[in-house]
Amino acid sequence: MRTFTSSQKIFNTLFFTSLAGATLLVGCKEPAAPNTANSNAAPTSGGGDSMKAKVYEGADILLGEYGSMTGSTATFGKSSHNGIKMALDEINAAGGVLKKQVKVTALDDKGVADEAATVVKRLITQENVLVILGEVASSRSLAAAPICQSAGVPMISPSSTNPAVTEKGDFIFRTCFIDPFQGTVGAKFAKETLKASKAAVLTDVKNDYSVGLAKFFEEEFIKNGGQIVAKSSYSEGDKDFHTQLTGIKGKSPDVIYIPGYYTDAGNIAIQARSLGMKQPLLGGDGWDSEKLTTIGKGAVQGSYFSSHYSPESKDPRVMKFVADYKKNYGATPDSLAACAYDAAKLMCDAIERAGSTDRDKIRDAIAATKDFPGVTGNITIDAKRNAIKPAVMLQVKGNEFKYVATVNP
Ligand code: PHE
């Protein structure tokens, strides 16, 4: 199994790919193979990125994966990779896909959108993967999806929830719910369970997910008779949130919604508490990381966030997954691991159903998925290539995220 490449290697790849594109690689490795053989593939999109992937000729079934294995969202990439590896090990032990073994080449995008585009280009033109899994973060999926679309390579994001991701084209799918739903779940929870009537929202403006989720939360909270008393913003990686938090404090909200990722959320919580702010903090799936409590410590205790599944579930399917994951990795699987495990299994199931490595047929098989039994719920792909699934609310208690409720769409 391949793992992550050094930045030097990625740099070399970028240099080559941007100079010569797919044609050079096809010419180098297999001069006879025309790179246009994938005839009725998807319409190309996005100016200079037009490059069809060459016909798949691998001896095994090779999946490509891109994710943040390093950087401030490193647990997203690492957990996802663990989930994918576990899925493939199980599939291979049961005979593989199309009677072949399944492998994955995973590349680190360092949590940077431009880097996501670069490594996905590389997966397609140099690693010659059949299909692609990733990313977690919507901004990174949005950067790479046009490349997969243009190349006619099916991509499944296990956990990107911004609606725009799958709007990039008919080769782009996700196996998780989307943020218009997640925002509604958060707003209803704030209103009905926390009995909040005034909310403040603190958004990461560099992050498509955060901007979208903030908007959907606000709309629903207002629709339910609530008031948004403060809207403030920061940029991923900021260290000092005192100005924003002081402004929010002055408006005395009943709850503060922070639709960002765990590193920033943890730091924001610490600073809010140091300013004497006692309001409940509420987040979305971006909080789901074992690092949330190591960074946020006591400041995040008692906070709530919406996510994709609970490892406490008594569903036998989930219990087996959690037990096997603990055995393999010595940790409780977070929702990234669970979502990625499901996405990998669904992808393999679709390839098997397609009956071939023709990417158009695989695309059609993914689109036709109905009631696929995942550990994050049953997955049916809708006409917009999204999954319709329940969400869960979790509460931070000690180093654990305790199950509070399931919300159905
Ligand atoms: N939904 C987030 C996004 O779209 C990513 C995420 C999913 C983060 C699940 C944590 C857990 O950016």
Image (spheres, grey):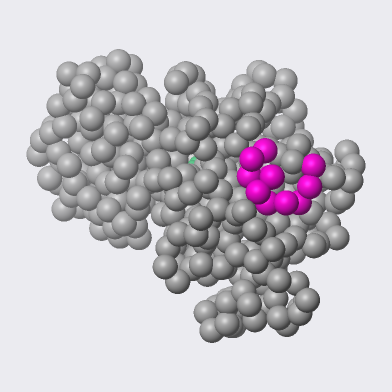
Q: Position of residue 279 (x, y in %)?
A: 25, 31
Q: Residue at x 69, y 32 (%)?
A: 322
Confirm whether residue 295 shows in the render. Answer: no
Figure quadrant of the N terminus:
bottom right
Q: Position of residue 276 (x, y in %)?
A: 21, 39
Q: Residue at x 64, y 58 (%)?
A: 39
65 up-or-down from 366: above or below: below
Confirm whether residue 40 shows in the render. Answer: yes
Say how many tags the image has. Answer: 0
397 is within the stretch colored magenta: no
When asked about the image quadrant of residue 373, the answer is top right
Q: Position of residue 251 (x, y in %)?
A: 10, 35
Q: Write the start and end of the magenta stretch as one range.
A: 355-365
Q: Residue at x 55, y 53 (%)?
A: 42
Q: Given the current orientation, which residue lies at the most extreme left position?
A: 250
Q: Residue at x 72, y 32 (%)?
A: 321
Figure quadrant of the C terminus:
top left
Looking at the picture, tell me which residue is in the foreground, 206 or 266: 206
Q: Given the current orientation, which residue lies at the most extreme front position?
A: 39
